[in-house]
Image: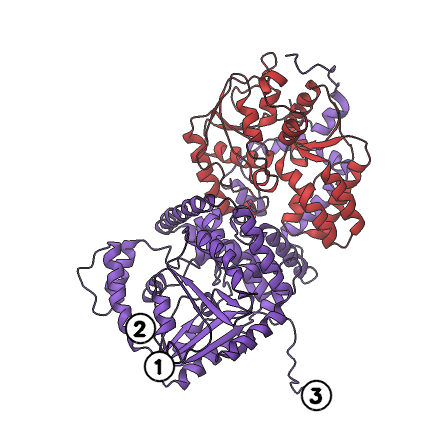
Chain colours: A purple, B red
Amino acid sequence: MSNVFMGMPSLPVFGDGNLHIDEPFPAAAHRELGNTQMRANLRHATHTIRDKRLKVVGELPDWEELRDAGAATKNLVMANLPALLEEFEKNFTARGGIIHWARDADEANRIVSDLIKEQDTDEVVKVKSMATQEIGLNEYLEEQGISAFETDLAELIVQLGHDKPSHILVPAIHKNRSEVRDIFLAEMPNVDPNLTDEPRLLAMAAREHLRRKFLSAKVAVSGANFALADSGTLAVVESEGNGRMCLTLPETLITVMGIEKLLPGKEDLEVFMQLLPRSSTGERMNPYTSLWTGVTEGDGPQNVHLVMLDNGRTAALADKYGRTALNCIRCSACMNVCPVYERTGGHAYGSTYPGPIGAILTPLLTGIKSEENSSLPYASSLCGACFDACPVKINIPEILVHLRGEDVDSKRGEKKLPSQMDLMMKGAQWAFSSGKHLGLLEKGLPLGKLAAGRDKKIKRLPGIAAGWTRSRDIPAPPTQSFRDWWKKDHRPAAATTEQEK
Amino acid sequence: MKIALFATCIVDAMYPQTARATVKILERLGHEVIFPSGQACCGQMHINSGYMDEALPVVANHVAAFEAETYDVAVAPSGSCVASVKHQHPILAERCGDAALKARAEAVGAKTYELSQLLVDVLGVTNAAEQLGSHFAHKVTYHPSCHGMRSLHLGDRQLDLLKSVGGIEVADLPEADQCCGFGGTFSMKNADVSSAMLEDKAKNIESTGASLCSGGDASCLMHIGGGLSRTKSNTTTLHFAEILASTMAEPVSVTGEVFVGKGGK
């Protein structure tokens, strides 16, 4: 056997780019929890969106049926993905579009960069896009001497502030308006030095700044919310109209899209255009929805490219218990209702995708063995609020538990010494796999009194349980278990009638 | 009706009075209660912590213990453990490649009810004062635990039962549907976030002016009660089964520290 590359990539190909948390979630969360201004901003923002969402969702008598339809459509797409991708490619190409397939972040970045260079420019305008965040396109282009200008207002705030997005829909959710004003004053060229933090004035300053870019840019880069297989149509759903400017003004449009964004056909938009705006911004309908199909002579971009991104999606699709995470339509409802996200913010999750969906999607794309990403599935109390809010019914808690199992299994055998958690679970397995064992152990309950103080409370436990007793007492255990009481002392009450008091 | 009690491990070992209250209520209604002696734990801690191999014998034990007896329905005073029995057991068995156990787990799960589910849906209890003689002259608030609310869709069953207790005053809990932050080993692995969630829950409970917070899951109540105790709050926690079991003649003691009952005496 020679080592010559034969053209067959080994599977699975895991995702790369901005998908790697560089410290374990608990450590990142500890730091972010200390940022009281951010926590106040986030609490206010998430609760506002939450309430708006509940109101508009409540207006639809068939909301649950819509969720079922959304889930069913997405499941169908995932089950037929290869055929649908080929159908899309055929139709997209027939209408003058050029399709590129990217196995991972690096391939996608190189394709986009080469396409920009072909147009002899070193500036591009960008429509808000999660896929390009995921692959770290802006950073890559910067290395290549190309400036990418974010045109979504919140992305602009984040970019000008040399910050990272902390939410997939509201990237600057962690900033309040006076912080936004400070960023504009410091970073925006030709800004009015008397700018106040009035939202209207902030928006006007941004508009003036952006308009110059729209009119001069030769190339735009976008993502896509949907791709319709039966016509080769792409769609972007947005609020500000800046996306529409990018999608229509420049000569060249390069779209980067995950392969899971497909829908079979335009009638599916009926379902998803009801689900998405209500779940994301809490609006009945978003202000701008742009759909484009290939090239139209004399109207809009004349060079239309699409980079189809895998970056770990095929690997995620191969996971029987995790694959429905690919059904995600990036609405962000799960993060808006998540009690963990609300307190830690998006940066604690390290990846482009924060919150509950990020805690499953990130390790699914990169593989559970990837660095610290294995800490993400534990970033949840499994309260289930995310599952209830998800417009395509992704059972996030169940997938979190599944990935915890993958994590534990992946570490079996590789460690020399079992962790405290391993030992605790092993001990509990013995105790909990037989009534006799548990009964025997319960005979020792009175010993627990020794650990308790005079106030009958246990205030300090060692090791991994120390985190519990940092903010919580544990009651001294009883002297007799229920099991023991039942055996020795239970006397069935004489049957009484319901009326008797 | 012959009812098999699944005490749950935490109630069996830490809060026996909650199980005794459950027995009392069911016997008061004229039913026969049995306690399958092989039972131990639902295995939820193992499953939710990712220790699937270790969970399998725990789940298999639960299934075998409840297959060993004949009864009409099984009941547990816990939404979380019942959700595990009904939903997690079959999935775990499937994941571990044990199709036979999956089918057996489904059969046991189908017969297992959370206490308020059994009382309201099966036994037709809608007025605790009238049908159970429940009396509890205190101001309480109520925290709906996540798994009961979202996995079992219990709705207001527990709360409505509490409201129908004689002499009780029930105060609405602000942001009641927010998780208390327990989440099993989450409270150890992510202790900081868990504590931040608990802090908000405790503040909301104290804002009601109630002398105690009731609920349907001993684990969440231990978590909330533990936090309230640490901050020297006057508010404590008590399982709703104990409030339902409390009568004029035999009131549950709430003098001093209640803290999910006082442990066995």
Find the distance from the CA under tag 1 to the CA under tag 3: 42 Å
- Residue B65: % across, % down: 78, 37
Q: Amino acid at mark 3?
A: Ser
Q: Mark 2 sits on what residue? A: A214
Q: Amino acid at mark 2?
A: Phe
Find the distance from the CA under tag 2 to the CA under tag 1: 14 Å
Find the distance from the CA under tag 2 to the CA under tag 3: 52 Å
Q: Which mark is residue A2?
A: 3
Dot 1 crowding, Cα within 10 Å, few <14, some 14–19, many 20+ = some
- Between marks 1 and 3 in the image, the one whose residue lies nearer the viewer: 1
- Between marks 2 and 3 in the image, the one whose residue lies nearer the viewer: 2
Q: Is residue B104 above or below residue A458?
A: below
Whether tag 1 and tag 3 are in contact, CB under 8 A, the answer is no
Whether tag 2 and tag 1 are in contact, CB under 8 A, the answer is no
Instruction: Looking at the image, tell me whether mark 2 or mark 3 is earlier in sequence order.
Output: 3
Give the quarter of the image for residue B82: top right
Dot 3 crowding, Cα within 10 Å, few <14, some 14–19, many 20+ = few
Q: Quadrant of the N terminus of chain B?
A: top right
Identify the residue at horizontal 55%, vertical 54% (top origin).
A392
Q: Quadrant of the C terminus of chain B?
A: top right
Identify the residue at horizontal 56%, vertical 57% (top origin).
A360
- Residue B251: % across, % down: 58, 16
Dot 2 crowding, Cα within 10 Å, few <14, some 14–19, many 20+ = many
